[in-house]
Amino acid sequence: MTVRIDKKIVGYSVRTGEEEGQAQQAAGQAAGRKEGDKVVQLHEKLERPEMLLGSTYKIKTPLSEHALYVTINDIVLNPGTEHEVRRPFEIFINSKNMDHFQWIVALTRIISAVFRKGGDVTFLVEELRSVFDPRGGYFKKGGRYMPSLVAEIGDAIECHLRMIGMLRDEGLDAHQRKLVEEKRAQYEAALAAAGAANGGDAFPEGAQLCGKCQTRAVVQMDGCMTCLNCGDSKCG
């Protein structure tokens, strides 16, 4: 292509291969930034769409006669692209029991505000599950200990974040799972031989609370306290 120069030439230089590569790299980065500018991120000024996807979780506790219903609505960002993600946008908690109305409304507004800020909101799970009721907690079906009603809400949020992929369940590896299953089978065989009944519970009657997984599944085996749920052992 011919370029006409109307001004006087006062100097010149020849671009080397390295400079050409740097120029191409800079152009590629600029194009990448331009493409990245199109990716929508969740922030507090993002307007709420007319319709949101949601899930409702039922919480039934011995602390209340009526169940608690936790609804979490999600917003889908960048739909139809490789950057499509589903993020929590708001939360609603409803119940026939009006005893906790004030603090439940306050909690839903605060959590919804944190959701809309964007970023990593998974810290909410641990914060809510660390709340203890001064009157004491209770055991859910399966032997899992729940320290408070607030912790139950945190548990529902954790379940939802796992469902949309914001939290990953590390779990036990194949070797650990096999070891736990073997230990549990040995313990149940010993109980059967002694004529003891389990009462249909998920874990043996008389098992203690595990400090790691908060499940009543710790029993003594081979002279060592071992959790039949997560494999935690005082003997390593």
Image (cartoon, rainbow, N blue to C red):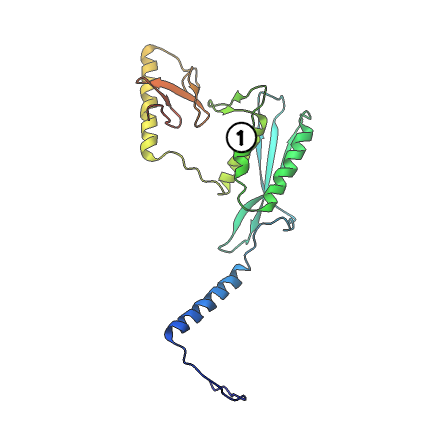
Amino acid carrying label 1: it is: Arg
Q: Position of residue 1 (x, y in %)?
A: 46, 84
- The relative height of residue 59 versus residue 199 in the rendered view (above or below) is below
| Residue 91 in sight from this viewpoint | no
Q: Position of residue 132 (x, y in %)?
A: 56, 25
Residue farthest toward the top in the current orientation of the protein: 195
Say which element carries label 1. helix
Q: Position of residue 88 (x, y in %)?
A: 57, 43
- The reply, left or right, for residue 226 in relation to residue 100 is left
Instruction: Please tell me which residue is depicted at 45% across the width and 83% down the height of the picture.
Output: 12
Which quadrant holds the C terminus? Answer: top left
Q: Position of residue 37 (x, y in %)?
A: 55, 60
Q: Quadrant of residue 222?
A: top left
Instruction: Please tell me which residue is depicted at 32% across the width and 30% down the height of the picture.
Output: 178
- The relative height of residue 222 versus residue 23 in the rendered view (above or below) is above
Residue, disc 1: 129
